[in-house]
Image (cartoon, rainbow, N blue to C red):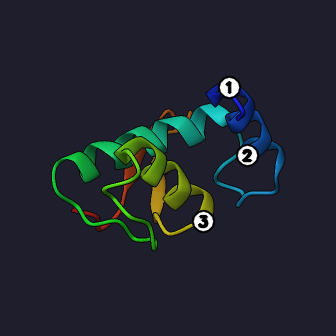
Amino acid sequence: MATAHEEIDRITEQPQGPEIDSKYRLIILAAKRSKQLQRGARPRIEIDPAKHKPTRIALEEVIQGTIPFHHVGESGEELIAEGLS
């Protein structure tokens, strides 16, 4: 089984949308989505929430492109997930 670090490296090596340009952006967006899931949002992918933690679900959602978001600010440091509850 791969470590979390190896998994993130593998994911960020795969072609992503132009918005996901680094593993740091991927992690920030997944963390924000994970908080939404912990507060009661429903997963946007077919996955059993009883068997997977919100962090894993959020990471898969971001990788599959089911989480719309946009950058705020010139540096792109802040990410806002759009229309999610």
Disc 1 from disc 2: Cα separation:
10 Å
Task: Give the residue number, with chain letter if any, for mark 2.
Answer: 11
Identity of the residue drawn at 27% across and 52% down: 37
Residue 17's spot in the image, x, y percent?
A: 70, 61
Q: Is residue 31 visible?
A: yes
Identity of the residue drawn at 81% across and 57% down: 15
Quadrant location of the N terminus in the rendered image: top right
Task: Give the residue number, with chain letter if any, for mark 3.
Answer: 64
Which mark's residue is nearer the viewer, 3 or 1?
1
Quarter of the image for residue 74 reads top right
Q: Few, some or many C-alpha atoms within 10 Å of disc 2 (few <14, some 14-19, many ≥20)?
A: some
Query: In the rendered view, does 64 fall on the left or right side of 10?
Result: left
Tell me: residue 64, above or below residue 77. Answer: below
Question: Mark number for residue 59?
Answer: none
Residue type at mark 3: give it: Gln
Quadrant location of the C terminus in the rendered image: bottom left
Query: In the rendered view, does 84 fall on the left or right side of 14?
Result: left
Query: In the rendered view, does 38 fall on the left or right side of 67?
Result: left
Q: Is residue 72 visible?
A: no
